[in-house]
Image (spheres, helix red, strand yellow):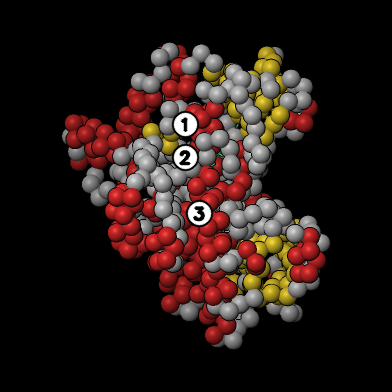
């Protein structure tokens, strides 16, 4: 690796891509196909992005495999066999490695390399990009595909006091952690914590779950695919490739057009049971649209979900602790679960409610909650991410006149279509804030659409013999306003979660993902392109 770093040092590129996950690999492929000299950089030692880092026990995709894949190559679609409806992390990682090999992408990726700063040189219309390996690259275009949920958060300062083993789920060691028979503590019960807890409960000696906020999780209906099932899905790929572009969240299902309020109580119940039985995120974002903007409907569906949770827990007092009451169903990311609630009926599992008495910190032997010490051998931090802005803010990016993206976003999180930021020419932010990515999108759909947009935009600049593009401040103000108006029509702004940046102290509050729908978002993006980037500064 070090040889590659040395030979590349100081090299000039047409484009530098950050990240070698789903978006980064595709961005590298597309720009290279256009004939550009491209280099992708990744802090990891191999491809995979999210699926490289999040190798914790039980990590699994919440999107169906038949819509969580690349569409650009018929050959790839023909060759790759998914083994189940919701694939595990190892399978998804294998898939991305297969793609990297098939399209010979590795030769243009420098691994083990973190971008430490990027400065726009206005005179030369180029980015100067420095890395922790001592590289100083220049590039005309700087495309960050660094991920929406890739900057892990450790909300403690004293965790090094702990003499046992500690791991954040998004930095899980490649060699794994032997949890068998150990006293294990898990902090966090979001989508990640739930997957970890339900997977390790039967392996560990004792499991303490430190829960601050319970979640509404929907049972995942996973199933193995045999050749017949795979062929049936494969026959649908042409339809799926098109349909996912236009639905509310980039899945094969869409919000229902039927109004919940028009149904009788029996019809409502029957409709909810039917959605529930699908065992996917369709109960949330493929169900009744009023769930997200009507308090009465939301209250009823929340109650339906609470009853489902209560029915799973033998001890009614414990059940009440696991039932969310402080926010409405679907106003934060809904996790899928497989046996999660049942874990709490086990003798070796204890729920430690830290909602009123918070975790005071670490001791040498474990965790302290109030006066009580919980002795542990291993602590698993499923404590989430600095979402949307974190990966970019940690890169120290400076645009026109030296302005700092980190500083800008520490006061006001702004972007245009989540793809560019005023004052930062030729910076492209795939999976950046204020696009539907992650929170309201099947990531594979949105990432490919965004990469395609970036690629078309760069192609346009080159065809027109132009050097740079950035949104005007008016264009940006328009998008931010539309984004906020759309968000404010929903119930989402009232809930504290990473969706609104509430998990990070001092982070400006704004819904990080656009909630107007993937189809509608695509129309805005297409319109920017067909209008030849009206409202953008093209120099
Ligand atoms: P998260 O949803 O932000 O959850 C973090 C958890 O840590 C929360 O339960 C939070 O409690 C808790 N926490 C943080 N600081 C704490 C403290 N000081 N004391 C006690 N508890 C603390 O993060 P995540 O679970 O990693 O999920 C992030 C996102 O990644 C998901 O929403 C999803 O979009 C994505 N994801 C997807 C999949 C999938 O597709 N299968 C799997 C995993 C993750 P509070 O809620 O009280 O703050």
Select label 2 or label 1 by which is in front.
1
At 71% from the left and 71% from the top, the residue drawn is 127
Residue 148 coordinates in the image, percent (x, y): 57, 52
- Of 402 and 459, nearer the camera is 459
Query: Which residue position holds label 3?
Result: 95
The residue singled out by tag 1 in the image is 215
The answer to whether 231 appears left or right of 535 in the picture is: left
Q: Position of residue 295 (x, y in %)?
A: 35, 37
In the picture, residue 416 is in which quadrant?
Answer: bottom right
Q: Which residue is identified by label 2?
A: 332
Q: Is residue 517 visible?
A: no
* x and y, in percent, of residue 308 in the image: 35, 26
Residue drawn at point x = 43 percent, y = 57 percent: 80
Badge 2 or badge 1: first in the primary sequence: 1
Q: Secondary structure at mark 1?
A: loop
Q: Residue at x 33, y 50 (%)?
A: 227
Q: Earlier in the sequence, mark 2 or mark 3?
A: 3
Q: Are marks 2 and 1 in contact (CB under 8 Å)?
A: yes
């Amino acid at each position: 690796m070090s040889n590659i770093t040395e030979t590349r040092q100081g090299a000039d590129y047409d484009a530098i891509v950050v990240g070698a996950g789903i978006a980064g690999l595709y961005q590298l492929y597309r720009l290279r196909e256009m004939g550009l000299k491209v280099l992708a950089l990744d802090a990891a030692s191999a491809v995979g992005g999210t699926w490289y880092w999040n190798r914790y026990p039980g990590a699994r995709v919440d999107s169906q495999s038949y819509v969580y894949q690349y569409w650009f190559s018929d050959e790839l679609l023909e060759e790759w066999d998914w083994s189940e409806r919701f694939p595990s992390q190892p399978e998804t990682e294998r898939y991305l490695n297969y793609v990297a090999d098939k399209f010979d992408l590795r030769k243009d990726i420098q691994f083990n390399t973190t971008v430490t700063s990027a400065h726009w040189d206005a005179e030369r219309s180029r980015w100067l990009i420095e890395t922790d390996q001592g590289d100083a690259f220049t590039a005309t275009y700087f495309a960050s595909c660094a991920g929406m949920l890739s900057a892990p958060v450790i909300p403690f300062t004293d965790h090094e006091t702990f003499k046992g083993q500690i791991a954040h789920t998004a930095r899980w060691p490649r060699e794994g952690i032997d949890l068998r028979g150990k006293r294990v503590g898990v902090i966090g019960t979001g989508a990640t914590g739930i997957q970890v807890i339900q997977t390790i409960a039967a392996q560990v000696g004792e499991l303490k779950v430190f829960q601050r906020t319970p979640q509404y999780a929907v049972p995942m209906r996973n199933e193995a695919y045999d050749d017949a099932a795979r062929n049936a899905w494969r026959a649908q790929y042409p339809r799926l490739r098109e349909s996912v572009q236009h639905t509310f969240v980039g899945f094969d299902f869409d919000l229902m057009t039927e109004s919940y309020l028009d149904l009788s109580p029996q019809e409502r119940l029957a409709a909810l049971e039917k959605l529930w039985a699908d065992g996917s995120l369709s109960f949330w974002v493929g169900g009744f649209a009023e769930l997200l903007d009507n308090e009465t409907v939301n209250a009823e569906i929340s109650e339906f979900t609470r009853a489902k949770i209560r029915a799973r827990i033998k001890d009614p007092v414990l059940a009440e602790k696991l039932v969310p009451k402080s926010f409405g169903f679907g106003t934060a990311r809904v996790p899928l679960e497989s046996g999660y609630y049942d874990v709490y009926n086990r003798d070796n599992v204890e729920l430690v409610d830290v909602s009123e008495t918070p975790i005071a910190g670490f001791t040498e032997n474990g965790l302290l909650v109030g006066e009580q010490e919980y002795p542990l051998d291993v602590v698993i931090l499923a404590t989430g991410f600095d979402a949307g802005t974190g990966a970019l803010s940690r890169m120290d990016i400076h645009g026109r006149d030296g302005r700092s993206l980190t500083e800008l976003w520490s006061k006001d999180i702004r972007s245009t279509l989540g793809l560019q930021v005023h004052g930062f020419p030729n910076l492209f932010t795939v999976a950046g804030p204020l696009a539907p990515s992650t929170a309201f999108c099947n990531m594979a759909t949105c990432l490919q659409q965004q990469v395609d947009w970036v690629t078309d935009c760069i192609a346009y600049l080159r065809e027109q013999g132009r050097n740079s593009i950035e949104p005007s401040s008016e264009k940006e103000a328009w998008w931010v306003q539309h984004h906020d108006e759309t968000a404010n029509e929903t119930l989402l702004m009232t809930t504290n979660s990473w969706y609104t940046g509430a998990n990070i102290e001092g982070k400006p509050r704004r819904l990080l993902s656009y909630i107007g729908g993937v189809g509608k978002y695509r129309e805005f993006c297409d319109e920017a392109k067909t209008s030849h980037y009206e409202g953008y500064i093209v120099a």
